[in-house]
Image: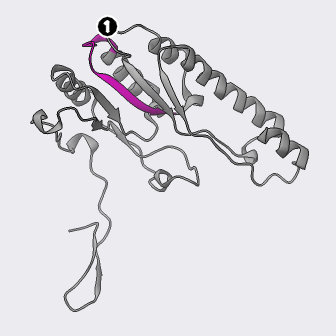
């Protein structure tokens, strides 16, 4: 089987060549008998990979981005809605990395709200657009339709900016987006990774002020 490494009976290591990544639309849908998942969180993914290269995250190892067909996604989301599962947790590493893909799914969820099922996403705050923010503020029929945003990629590297002022500007813009989510019905969990590297022009006062 390509893609695996194993030890043979004689103790030698056998390493098979890498496999070509599978089309995500060909990955089987595993949820059928929902009695097995009663009162449990449902984990679901519509994409694999991440477009960013954050050094602290293993997701940056895979340089490919793959998306599941929206037609399949809509059918599978409807399956969850029809079975009134309490929560669907998307495990896409950066759900909103592709605007059209994310908006299509969020709009479908809004239009088919059953008043019971809510949804959890990991998103990058600095990629959220006004259209997406307005979509999250629309009321749902029951519990909060979009139960939680986990802002999972807040990484600033000084080598990507002209000066510390640029870092501050991006930092504040991102947190302005988070504040807008906090004011709406969306619960937010934020994991902040702030890294200042390869910038010899930074003074101790710059670093201290940024940390504050």
Residue 48: image location, x then y, percent: 37, 44
Whether residue 176 sits left or right of residue 106 in the image: it is right
Q: Residue tagged by mark 1?
A: 141
Residue 15 placement (x, y as % from top left): 30, 77
Q: Along the line of sight, which residue is nearer the eye, 115 or 10? A: 115
Q: Residue 6, located in which quarter of the rendered image?
A: bottom left
Going by the picture, which residue comes out furthest to the bottom? 10
* Viewer-side residue, 39 vs 8: 39
> Which quadrant is home to the N terminus?
bottom left
Q: Who's the residue at 19% across and 88% down the image?
A: 9
The answer to whether residue 203 of the structure is visible from this angle is no
Q: Is residue 49 left or right of residue 193?
A: left
Please state if 129 lies on the left or on the right of 91 as rendered.
Answer: right
| Mark 1 burial class by Cα count in 10 Å: few <14, some 14-19, many 20+ | few
Q: Is residue 104 visible?
A: yes
Place of residue 168 in the rendered image (x, y in percent of width and height, measured from the top left): 77, 33
Residues in magenta, as a range: 110-123
Task: Locate residue 141 relative to residue 199 in the image: left or right.
Answer: left
Circle 1: element type: loop
The residue drawn where x is 15% and y is 23% is: 83
Q: Position of residue 59 (x, y in %)?
A: 46, 51
Residue placed at 47% from the left, 15% from the top? 185
- Going 20% across and 43% down the picture, which residue do you hit? 26
Question: Does 119 appear in magenta?
Answer: yes
- Vertical comparison of 61 with 49: above or below: below
Tally of marks: 1
Which image quadrant for residue 192? top right
In the picture, the quarter occupied by the C terminus is top right
Between residue 145 and residue 46, name the one nearer to us.
145
Q: Is residue 23 magenta?
A: no
């Amino acid at each position: 089987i390509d893609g695996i490494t194993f030890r043979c009976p004689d103790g030698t290591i056998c390493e098979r060549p890498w496999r070509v990544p599978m089309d995500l639309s060909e990955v089987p849908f595993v949820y059928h008998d929902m009695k097995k998942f009663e009162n449990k969180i449902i984990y679901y993914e519509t994409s694999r990979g991440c477009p960013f290269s954050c050094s602290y995250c293993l997701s940056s190892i895979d340089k490919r981005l793959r998306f599941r067909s929206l037609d399949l996604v809509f059918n599978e989301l409807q399956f969850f809605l029809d079975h009134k599962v309490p929560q669907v947790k998307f495990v896409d590493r950066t759900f909103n990395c592709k605007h059209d893909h994310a908006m299509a799914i969020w709009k479908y969820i809004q239009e088919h709200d059953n008043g019971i099922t809510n949804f959890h996403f990991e998103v990058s705050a600095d990629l959220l657009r006004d259209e997406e923010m307005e979509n999250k503020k629309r009321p749902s029929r029951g519990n909060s339709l979009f139960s939680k945003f986990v802002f999972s990629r807040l990484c600033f590297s000084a080598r990507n900016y002209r000066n510390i002022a640029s870092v501050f500007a991006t930092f504040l813009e991102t947190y302005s987006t988070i504040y807008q989510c906090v004011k709406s019905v969306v619960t937010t969990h934020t994991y902040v990774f702030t890294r200042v590297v390869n910038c010899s022009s930074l003074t101790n006062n710059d670093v201290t002020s940024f940390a504050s």
